[in-house]
Image: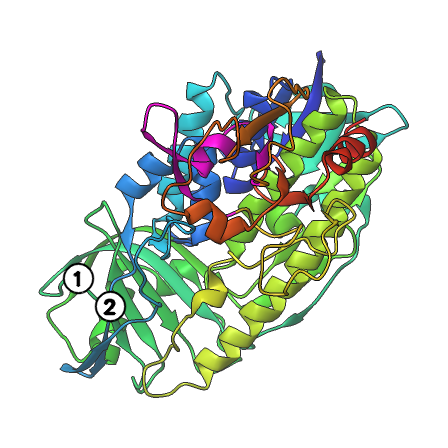
């Protein structure tokens, strides 16, 4: 038995755990990331990276690698047997704008997202311990004592100030806490999802769907950056229980594809990953119990319809990371950590409802098998307006204007050298950002606020110039304190409101 002291122990090295580890690593928080499996997640399942998550990846310094590994959602090719019927867009197309630099979903196999996040963690000097599972833990007023088991059965005791369970829908952490996980079965019928290699003539430029196949819906699409395809098979009979060992062999899948598509020349040559699922929506009763937190699928599970699960999970970690650091290093009160539960539980409940509605809408769509996804899926409109951390001090602000609690938009400005400087460049990093758009020099040029970077946009002593008016259009006038996770904490016309907020919330 050995003993190791860390500030945060993270159980589960999927996208949620990796993002949290990156957040803590760049803030200098001693942490340990453990994963029961011997490698990262091997499948393509969570493949849609929504615009808001792309903004998170921008801040974390991984957006370039993720974008290079992925591509746009391809147009859908609807078939009836061997006949092509029509081509249509599943997602809403849009061009980048000053406020929204990432306007569309990005398609990336989940295993590749995990790879790139892990590479970023290593680049920052962090690591993950694979083949190391959390066996059990106890907590007291001062911390958590956990037992870890290695692949060889060796036991290790770890003492941490906090434990975060990012260990999936069957979370060991959640079960050990005894936290209720209430929900509903979204669909009684099962589906089989498979990553495979395919021989035969089928282009990779479309998402091929056979919604009217006699035995049930089937779809094939090429996986970005690979030679593989992803196959989705739905089953009509609720009593049928697919078995990977029986139904996901190359021979069985070749027969299923031929029968449902009417294309006899397609042949599965290799299966790299397969999984059976019955869509369910459920959420933990609470996301914080003392010094233990739940995030990602450990806290909430969704129907995959609409591509919300991985994105919501990543943003759980993004929300929690800066708060843990603020309490552990910045002198913030413990009550700040309660706002993680408050903010993310409300978001998760909304996303569960959205995913479930989209699933039922898809299932009732017979012509194409899936229904069009709009901008409501992008997660750019999710907000914390009702949070205890959001302070709107201005009067009579229109509902459709930017409020405290909203996502802070991007805007290209110019620095003193005339070079383009985006507001996302200003936000990038672990700090708070104060934008002075009052035009009056409300924040004195000599002002210094620990942990806060100040940018005066226009006015008598500007740091940035808004020559095209993009910042003014996105924000309006006033002072805007931006949280480390890119949401407006304070919107006001008075510098004293910002000072009071920081003293109260950050200590």
Residue at point 72%, 44% (across, down): 340
Q: Which residues are magenta?
A: 409-437
Which residue is the site of mark 1?
Answer: 205
Residue 486 image offset from top left, x and y in percent:
56, 41
Q: Is residue 418 left or right of residue 226?
A: right
Residue at point 32%, 62% (across, down): 94
Asked if the stretch drawn in magenta spans residue 378, the answer is no
Q: Is residue 375 left or right of residue 442?
A: left
Task: Determine the secondary structure under disc 1.
Answer: loop
Which numbered disc flags the more N-terminal residue, 2 or 1?
Answer: 2
Dots 2, 1 in contact, CB < 8 A: yes
- Which quarter of the figure has residue 431? top right
Is residue 290 shown above or below 387? above
Q: Is residue 445 visible?
A: yes
Residue toward you, 238 or 482: 482
Asked if the stretch drawn in magenta spans residue 434, the answer is yes
Task: Determine the secondary structure under disc 2.
Answer: loop
Is residue 122 shown above or below 184? above
Which circle marks residue 217 in the picture? none
Q: Is residue 134 visible?
A: no
Colour scheme employed for the rendering of this structure = rainbow
Quadrant where the N terminus is found in the figure: top right
Residue 330 image offset from top left, x and y in percent:
73, 21
Residue 45 image offset from top left, x and y in percent:
42, 54
Report the Cα–Cα distance between label 2 and label 1.
8 Å
Residue at point 44%, 21% (across, down): 122
Which residue is the site of mark 2?
Answer: 75
């Amino acid at each position: 038995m050995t003993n190791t002291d860390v500030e945060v122990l993270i159980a589960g090295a999927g996208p949620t755990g990796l993002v949290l580890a990156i957040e803590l690593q760049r803030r200098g928080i001693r942490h340990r990331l453990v994963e029961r499996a011997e490698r990262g997640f091997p499948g393509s399942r969570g493949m849609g990276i929504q615009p808001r998550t792309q903004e998170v990846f921008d801040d974390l310094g991984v957006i370039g690698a993720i974008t290079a590994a992925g591509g746009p959602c391809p147009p859908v090719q609807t078939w009836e047997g061997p006949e092509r019927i029509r081509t249509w867009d599943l997602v809403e197309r849009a061009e980048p704008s000053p406020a929204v630099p990432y306007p569309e979903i990005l398609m990336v196999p989940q295993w590749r997202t995990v790879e790139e996040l892990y590479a970023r963690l290593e680049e920052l000097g962090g690591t993950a311990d694979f083949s190391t599972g959390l066996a059990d833990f106890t907590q007291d007023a001062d911390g958590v004592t956990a037992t870890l088991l290695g692949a060889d059965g060796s036991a290790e005791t770890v003492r941490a100030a906090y434990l975060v369970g990012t260990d999936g829908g069957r979370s060991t952490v959640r079960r050990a806490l005894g936290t209720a996980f209430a929900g509903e079965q979204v669909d009684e019928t099962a589906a089989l999802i498979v990553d495979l290699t395919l021989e035969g003539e089928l282009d990779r430029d479309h998402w091929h769907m056979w919604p009217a196949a006699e035995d049930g819906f089937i779809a094939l699409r090429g996986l970005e950056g690979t030679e593989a395809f992803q196959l989705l098979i739905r089953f009509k009979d609720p009593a049928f229980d697919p078995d990977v060992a029986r139904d996901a062999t190359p021979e069985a899948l070749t027969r299923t594809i031929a029968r449902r598509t009417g294309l006899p020349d397609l042949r599965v040559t290799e299966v790299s990953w397969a999984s059976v699922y019955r869509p369910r929506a459920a959420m933990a009763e609470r996301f914080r119990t003392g010094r233990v937190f739940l995030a990602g699928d450990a806290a909430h599970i969704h129907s995959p319809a609409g591509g919300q699960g991985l994105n919501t999970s990543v943003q759980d970690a993004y929300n929690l990371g800066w708060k843990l650091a603020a309490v552990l290093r910045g002198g913030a009160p413990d009550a700040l950590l309660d706002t993680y539960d408050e903010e993310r539980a409300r978001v998760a409940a909304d996303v569960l409802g959205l995913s479930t509605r989209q699933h039922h809408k898809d299932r009732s769509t017979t012509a194409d098998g899936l229904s069009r996804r709009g901008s409501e899926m992008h997660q750019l409109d999710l907000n914390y307006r009702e949070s205890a951390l959001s302070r709107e001090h201005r009067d009579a602000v229109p509902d459709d204007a930017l409020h405290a609690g909203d996502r802070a938009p991007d805007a290209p400005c110019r620095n003193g050298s005339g070079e383009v400087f985006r507001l996302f460049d200003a936000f990038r990093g672990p700090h708070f950002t104060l934008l002075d758009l009052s035009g009056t020099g409300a924040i004195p040029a000599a002002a210094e606020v620990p942990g806060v970077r100040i940018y005066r946009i226009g006015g008598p002593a500007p740091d940035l110039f808004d020559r095209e008016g993009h910042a003014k259009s996105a924000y309006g006038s006033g002072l805007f304190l931006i949280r480390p996770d890119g949401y407006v904490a304070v919107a006001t016309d008075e510098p004293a409101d910002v000072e009071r907020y920081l003293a109260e919330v950050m200590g």
